Amino acid sequence: MGVSLPRKDLFKLPRGVIYLDGNSLGVLPKGAAARAARVIEAEWGQQLIRAWNDAGWMDLPRVVGDRIAALIGAPEGSVATGDTLSIKVYQALAAALKMRPDRRVILSDSGNFPTDLYMAQGLIGTIDKGYELRTPAPEDAADAISEDVAVVMLTHVDYRSGRMHDMKAITEKAHAAGAVMIWDLAHSAGAVPVDMAGSNAEFAVGCTYKYLNGGPGAPAFIYARPDIIEDVAPALAGWLGHAAPFAMEPGYRPAMATERLRVGTPPILQLAVLQEALTVWDGVDMDEVRAASIALSERFVLEVSSRCPDLTLASPADPLRRGSQVSFAFKEGYAAMQALIARGVIGDFRAPDIMRFGFTPLYLDEADVIHAAEILQEVIRTEAYLDPAYQARSRVT
Ligand SMILES: *Cc1c(COP(=O)(O)O)cnc(C)c1O
C-alpha cells in the first residue's frame, strides 16, 4: 500500500481555486520555493563555481533522471534530463532514423501535439534525403505501420481528447515491421502507470512541468533502452554528452550510456526545483494514482453530462482508454472556459472547441470535481460566456 491520496498538504494551492489544469502546468509543491532560494543564495551566491562539484550540480541531471525513471518503469541510469521536450523529440527521432538507414518514413498520427510533428518536419528538411512524415488519424495509426516505416513516433495520451494508445501492442507491431518505436509521455508521466522496460520501446521522451509539477520551463527527459544506447549516435553532439567534457578535445566522442543524450549546461535552478517537486511522489503507488484518477474523472463526466447536456464528451467514454484528462466539446468553449476560470475553476481550452480538464489525484478530491461541475453548470445555464469580457482571446489559451 502506498501513501493515501490526495496529499494536498504538500502543495501550495491558492485559496478558492479548483485546479483542473495540472495536465498543462502542475501546481507548486511546498518545498520548491525554499529549494530555489537555497540554490540561489547558498549555492550560487556563496559557493559560486565550486558548486558544480560541491553542491552536486554536475550530477543533478542524472539524479533527477533516475527519479523520473522510477515513475515510468525504466531502469536506473536510462533517463537523461535537460532541454525542452521539443529538443528531446528531435534527439530521439534523429537517433532512431540512423538505426534504420534503408527506410525513409516517419509514422506519427494527425492528433499528435504539433511541436512533435514540426520537429519531424524540420529534421526531414535538414537531412534532405527524401524522408516522409505520415500522419494517419490516431485510430488508424497502428494499421498504418508497414515495412517501409523507419520510426513510429506517437504520443501515448492525446493532449486534446485524452485518448490513450496501447503502448505494448503498438510497440510490438512496430517491432514486427522492423521499425523503431518512440513514445512521447508528456501526458503520461505522473498521470498513468507506464512500463517503459516492459514495453520494449527504444525511446521515450516527456516533459516535467505537467503532471510532474516541475514548474514553467522545467527540463524535459529522454529515455533510451539500455541495450541500444551504446549504438546511439547523438545528433546534438554537445560537450556535456562527450565522454570527457573537460578534456576539451576538438573531436566528439560520445559519453557512455545515457549521458550521451545530454547536450549543454544543465538548468540547475529548474532541475533543483524539479528534484524537490518529485519528492511528492515518495511512497506513491502509480496504480493507486490511476484508480483515484479514474474515480475523479468518471465522477466529473457523470456530473457534467447530467448538468450540462449542451456539452459533448470529446474523450473516450471508457476510462481505461483515456489518460488522466477529460475533454468536452462546446461551440462557445473558449469563452465558457474564461467564465469558469473567473469563478475559480481552472481548466484550459484547445482549438477549435475543446474544454479540457485534467485530474491530478495528488491534490484533487471528489468534492473538488463535484463543485467544479456545479460551477460549470451555472456558467452554461446562465450563458455567462456571452459576456464580451470572456470572448477576447489571450496569447496562451
Ligand atoms: C506539452 C507537450 C509538448 C511541449 O513541448 P515543449 O518543448 O516542452 O514546449 C510537446 N509534445 C507533447 C505531446 C506535449 O504534450
Image (cartoon, grey):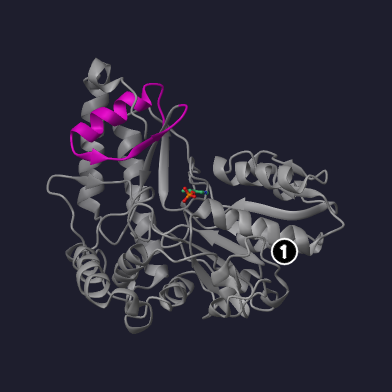
Taking the image as shown, residue 372 lies to the left or right of residue 111, namely left
Residue situated furthest left in the rendering = 15
Q: Secondary structure at mark 1?
A: helix
The amino acid on which the numbered mark 1 sits, given as a three-letter code, is Glu
Taking the image as shown, residue 239 lies to the left or right of residue 394, namely right
Q: Quadrant of residue 182?
A: bottom right
Q: What residue range appears in magenta? A: 329-352
Front one among 308 and 94: 94
Residue at 57% from the left image edge and 69% from the top image edge: 239
- 369 relative to 390, above or below: below
Taking the image as shown, residue 390 lies to the left or right of residue 268, namely left
Taking the image as shown, residue 247 lies to the left or right of residue 307, namely right
Is 341 colored magenta in this rendering?
yes
Residue at 42% from the left image edge and 69% from the top image edge: 287
- 340 relative to 107, above or below: above
Is 218 colored magenta in this rendering?
no
* Residue picked out by circle 1: 172
Q: Which quarter of the figure is the N terminus placed in? A: bottom left
In the rendered image, residue 192, in percent from the top left (x then y), is placed at: 45, 61
Residue at 56% from the left image edge and 75% from the top image edge: 259
Q: Which quarter of the figure is the C terminus placed in? A: top left
